[in-house]
Structure formats: C-alpha cells, structure tokens
Amino acid sequence: MTHNIDLILDTSGLFCPEPVMLLHKNVRAVNVGDVIQVIATDPSTMRDIPKFCHFLGHELLEQQEKGDGYYYVIRKAE
C-alpha cells in the first residue's frame, strides 16, 4: 500500500523508550491527518508503537519488518 508521507522519522539505533518518545514529540508537530513513517531497529517497537497508536487514537496504517528494520506508517488523529 502506498501512502503520501508527510514526515519520515528515522529512529534507527535508538532503544526503548526513545523511538516512542520521538514519535510522540513529532506527532504533536504535524497536522491532523498527516502521515508519519517511522523507521526503527529496536524490536520492542513492534509492541510499543501499535500500543502508542491505540492509546492515543492514531491510525496505524502499516507495520512491517524488512531485513533488520521495522517500518510503521501512522496517520495522526485529532
């Protein structure tokens, strides 16, 4: 699936809780409906980012593991 990405957040090399903390900071900086792609190398993001989206109501459009990375596409909710 292809999405128009408004912001790419590369958290490669960072470990829990840094990827989610950076995502939280950047979500506040974009507009409602904007789409953020998160790139991560920490496997804990497979648990943490979906929970973050569910808890705050953001839409997790994609979640996948490719090679040694994890990729997420999130649409900001209100």
Image (spheres, grey):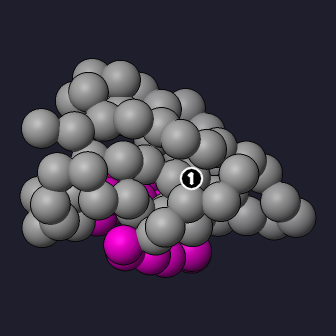
Q: Is residue 32 above or below residue 26?
A: above
Q: Is residue 46 above or below residue 51?
A: below
Residue 69 in sight in this render:
yes
In the image, what residue occupies the spot 38% across and 59% down? 35
- Is residue 24 inside the magenta stretch? yes
Is 55 placed left or right of 39 in the picture? left
Which structural element holds mark 1? strand
The image shows residue 72 at horizontal and vertical percentages of: 56, 52
What is the quadrant of the C terminus in the image?
A: top left
In the image, what residue occupies the spot 78% across and 51% down? 65
The image shows residue 43 at horizontal and vertical percentages of: 66, 48
Is 17 placed left or right of 63 in the picture? left
Residue occupying the far right of the picture: 67
In the image, what residue occupies the spot 73% across and 64% down? 69
Q: Which residue is mark 1?
A: 72
> In this view of the protein, which residue sits in the foreground, 4 or 69?
4
> In this view of the protein, which residue sits in the foreground, 60 or 34?
34
In the image, what residue occupies the spot 17% across and 51% down? 32
Location of residue 70 (image quadrant): bottom right
Q: Which residues are magenta?
A: 6-25
Location of residue 23 (image quadrant): bottom left
Residue 42 in sight in this render:
no
The image shows residue 51 at horizontal and vertical percentages of: 41, 27
Amino acid, disc 1? Tyr
Number of numbered discs: 1
- Is residue 69 inside the magenta stretch? no
Is 27 placed left or right of 20 in the picture? left
**Mark 1 residue crowding within 10 angstroms, few (<14) / some (14–19) / many (20+):** many
The image shows residue 46 at horizontal and vertical percentages of: 61, 39
